[in-house]
Image (spheres, rainbow, N blue to C red):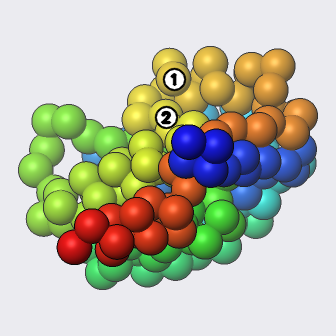
Amino acid sequence: MDNEFITLTIPEKKSIALIAHDGKKEELIKWCLANKDILSKHSLIGTGTTARMITDRTGLTVKGYNSGPLGGDQQIGARIVEGRVDFVIFFSDPLTAAPHDPDVKALLRIAQVYDIPMASNKATADFMITSSLMDKTYDHNVINFKENIRQRASTL
């Protein structure tokens, strides 16, 4: 079927979401400092405390949303659905339970559904941010959700 997928474009100037669990905030701040020149060329957003700490410690402008446990992960996920987040850096802590784990899983899932590059640790973030695609537009195919819904509705 020709219209099963649609092509979306990640622009040259990306909207990057920066998120970190409490035990990983310091690591993300150090990573942001090390990559400040690259990050400063893009639009940055983040969840509450993380956004504030990055701004305070690096001088980068990071628009903050709610903290993760108060819905910030869901706000970032909604921005992905709206096509307003192109790239996610989420330093998660696999050794500490998070009370908002279902929200984190929902964010991971929505990033996968919309084929958004997402790093969950420093090594992956390093590879992504130094990619030759970082400063270029990038076309990618995602499910044509309107067509998918139309087809599903016609079979019910």
For marks 1 and 2, give the CA distance.
5 Å
Name the spot of residue 85 as percent of width and height, x first. 64, 59
Q: Which residue is mark 2?
A: 119
For the residue marked with disc 2, what is the amino acid? Ala
* Quadrant placement of the N terminus: top right
Name the spot of residue 109 as percent of width and height, x first. 34, 50
Mark linked to residue 91: none
* Quadrant placement of the C terminus: bottom left
The 10 Å Cα crowd at callout 2, few under 14, some 14 to 19, many 20 or more, is many
Q: Is residue 115 left or right of residue 21?
A: right
Q: Is residue 15 left or right of residue 114?
A: right
Specify which label sits upstream in the sequence, 1 or 2. 2
- Residue 78 visible to an observer of this rendering: yes
Name the residue: 68% across, 38% down.
140
Name the spot of residue 127 as percent of width and height, x first. 62, 18
Name the residue: 33% across, 65% down.
152
Mark linked to residue 124: 1
Q: Is residue 139 left or right of residue 156?
A: right
For the residue marked with disc 1, what is the amino acid? Thr
